[in-house]
Structure formats: C-alpha cells, structure tokens
Image (tube, rainbow, N blue to C red):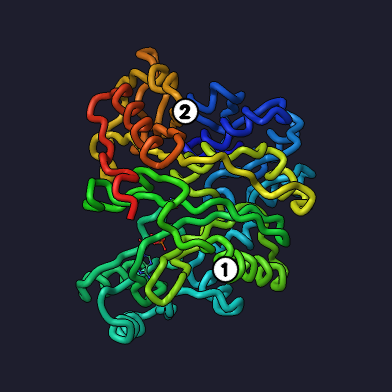
Amino acid sequence: MIGGGGREHALALALSRDPEVTEVHAAPGNPGIGEVARLHPVDPLDGAAVARLARDVQADLVVVGPEAPLVRGVADAVRAAGVACFGPSADAARLEGSKAFAKEVMAAAGVPTAASRVCETEQEAAEALDAFGSPYVVKDDGLAAGKGVVVTEDREAALQHAKVCGRVVIEEFLDGPEVSLFAITDGETVYPLQPAQDFKRALDGDQGPNTGGMGAYTPLPWAPTGLVAEVQERVLVPTVREMARRGVPFQGLLYAGLALTARGVRVVEFNARFGDPETQALLGRLESPLGALLHAAAEGRLAEVEPPRWRQGAAVTVVMAADGYPEGPRTGDVITGIEDAAALDGVDVIQAGTARSERGLVTAGGRVLAVTAAGVDVAQARTRAYAGVALVDFAGARHRTDIAQEVP
Ligand code: AMP
Ligand code: GLY
C-alpha cells in the first residue's frame, strides 16, 4: 500500500481482512495502517525506492493510493521492476493530472461533460467567461489538490484566478446533485462500484471553504434507478476504450465525479484513484475480497473474477478534522477514545492525520480521522457513525453534524 492517508488506511484494512492476503506492507503508512500492515519509511513519490521495497518484501501486488505518485510514474516504476501494480501509468493518470487532457478524451469518446474552453491568455479567459456566463467555473489545468477550481458569480475573481493559474479550463456551470461513481478496470473490463456522495465544504449546510472531504455515504437511495448502468455505458466504458485506442490504457481506479443536471448526467471531473472519504464508506459495504479484484485488474485479467458484491444496507463516514482546517490546522493534540468507538457495532475508525508521540497518539494533519459505520440503512449507519464520533476526542476537534442527514 503506497500512501498514508485515510483512503490508504481503509484500503489496507480491507486488504488485511481478505483471507487470501497474507501480509500487508505500507509506505509510509500511518499509525492506523500500522495496526494492520508493516510500515516502511519510504517516500511514496520516489518510484525507484517504492519498486525496491516491493522487490525486497516480495510483494505480489502494489496498490498506489494517492494521485501524486501516479502522476509521477510510480506505478510505471513498480511494473518495470516486474511487480504487479494497481494504478495507472503516468500517461494514463493525466485523466486526473490535466483537466485539458480529460476534456479532450471525453470529447473524443462522446462522454457528456460541461462545454469548455482551454485558455492561456487573459483575453481568451475573458471571452470564455462571457461566452458561458455566470456562475463562472475556472479550473487550473494541473493537479491542485482540490484547490484549483473556482466557482463564482464574481467575474473579476474568476478572471483573477485564470491569471494566477496561467493555463486554465473555463467551462459551463453544472447545476444538480453531485455523485461519485468509481470503477475498477484493467484497461478493458470495467466493474463499477456503488454510487457515493461526499461533502466537500468545511461547515454544516455546505457552508465554509472547500476541503478534501468532510464525510460521505453510500449507496444513494435517491439516485435514479439505472444510474450505474447509464454511467457505465455513457462514461466509464467509452473513456476506458478511448484511452486504450490512444495507446495509453487506463488500469486502476477510474473515479467519475458526476453532476446529475436537468439535462442528464455530466462528468465534472475524472480522478485516477480511489476518492477520499468515499472509499472509507464504500469499503464498509464491500463483500467481495478486495485483493482478488485489485490483483486481477493489475494483471489484465479482471474478466476472470466476479464483479464486486455488496452487503445490504448503507455506510456513512464522518471526518473529524483539526481546529483551523483547512486553512492552518493545529497539530500535536492527544487523541483519545478510538478503541471505544471502534468497539461499537459496525464501526471502524480510519486514521489519516495522526502520529505516534511519547504522549500517545496525536493529531498530525488537517483531516485527523474518519469514523465509518455500516447499518441496515443510511439512518442507522449515520446514528452509529455519530455515536463513534462522540467517543473520540482531541483538543479543537471539529466535524460536520449533517453528513447524510438530508438524503434528498
Ligand atoms: P473538480 O476539481 O473538477 O472536481 O472541481 C471541484 C468542485 O468544483 C466540484 O466537486 C464541483 O463541486 C465544483 N465544480 C467543478 N466543475 C463545475 C461545474 N462545471 N459546474 C459546477 N460546479 C463545478
Ligand atoms: N472525494 C474527493 C476526492 O477524493 O477527490
């Protein structure tokens, strides 16, 4: 397991619970991952070092969690060393790494998305803003850890963002609920997972700044029947086919961020890895062994394993963040109550920004941990998740109280 956040803890936990998996190693991991895997102080961005570690521990499979190593070619380095790797090549990860590339692929594949223009000068940007009108959507072309997108009714602010970024994608505003739908693919066979929703804003009622995600739930009882089949047919399969046609097959996790607009499904963005914190919720319901799916995808034989099976019911994930997140989170506060929360029915505590110190487990990042609970339905999973949150404590702990509350 490459990475050390909440997504990687959820993946490592699911792998450790797979009876076919004998050992899990992580680089660099985190204290939560350390409970289910052996940790190695290896830089996840250093492809040569990751490949060496994979050889040293005789790994059958390397799973790359975050986007940054993928965009840097860490999966290529691992494969070049003769080890199977779940995660796209650097070239294929451009689906996430470059908004302009993603738009080009979608156009070629006929995938429904917002109309857009790539702009490199202030004048091009100004013309695009006026062509699409308010609200304005301006996206930095490169990887920006969720901070590259500005949606605003203020034309000056939109223009300013375009100027600061240099090369941007300016696009039509998409109205409607957002859905995350992930698919595991080996570049040919595509297995969609279940729809999930994440909560990006820091505060209740979708107020406050954008974050990496404050919570999630799955499935979406309100989603139209046939949504997964429609996205499979109109988005996931055509995108994977188009990537293969270009000679840059996409193998790994294809994340479609969707808007359900009045005019139909539109792709908001692609990511090249599991979403965080949707993965924490999704894996709480996955019944199939995760290892076999990821391994088969990595080896180009996904069609030989059954599509993922899911437990009945729902799962809800509530993120506990540090005071000051996302602007300037404070760190070093002692965390208590994790064991008590994890002992509750259906509850897992997934760590993200934590560290060991002589005072015990302390906060070490903005999103500190996530309490994930499974239940017979969203309401029960939600009650259980918040019961877990109530038991975990650290100075300045913050969480949203409305995750999965108003299921539209
Ligand atoms: P992205 O990094 O492309 O996912 O954008 C981050 C967030 O900005 C998305 O989750 C949406 O909430 C919002 N956003 C992006 N593109 C659009 C759009 N065309 N219309 C409305 N909102 C958007
Ligand atoms: N849940 C948003 C992301 O992983 O990008």
**Location of residue 344 in the rendering, given as x and y in whole percent from the top left corner:** 42, 22
The C terminus - image quarter: bottom left
Is the C-beta separation of discs 1 and 2 under 8 Å? no
**Location of residue 63 in the rendering, given as x and y in whole percent from the top left corner:** 64, 42
Residue 64 is at least partly visible in this image: yes
The residue drawn where x is 61% and y is 76% is: 109
Is residue 155 toward the left or the right of residue 385 in the image?
left
Residue 28: which quarter of the image?
top right
Residue 214: which quarter of the image?
top left
Is residue 188 toward the left or the right of residue 133 in the image?
right
**Location of residue 250 in the rendering, given as x and y in whole percent from the top left corner:** 66, 60
The residue drawn where x is 35% and y is 56% is: 147
Q: Earlier in the sequence, mark 1 or mark 2?
A: 1
Judging by the rendered image, the residue that carries numbered circle 2 is 346
Q: Which mark is residue 235?
A: 1
Secondary structure beneath dot 1 equals helix
Q: Is residue 296 above or below residue 368?
A: below
Q: As shown in the figure, which amino acid type bears the numbered disc 1?
A: Val
The residue drawn where x is 66% and y is 31% is: 18
Q: Nearer the viewer, residue 294 or 227?
A: 227
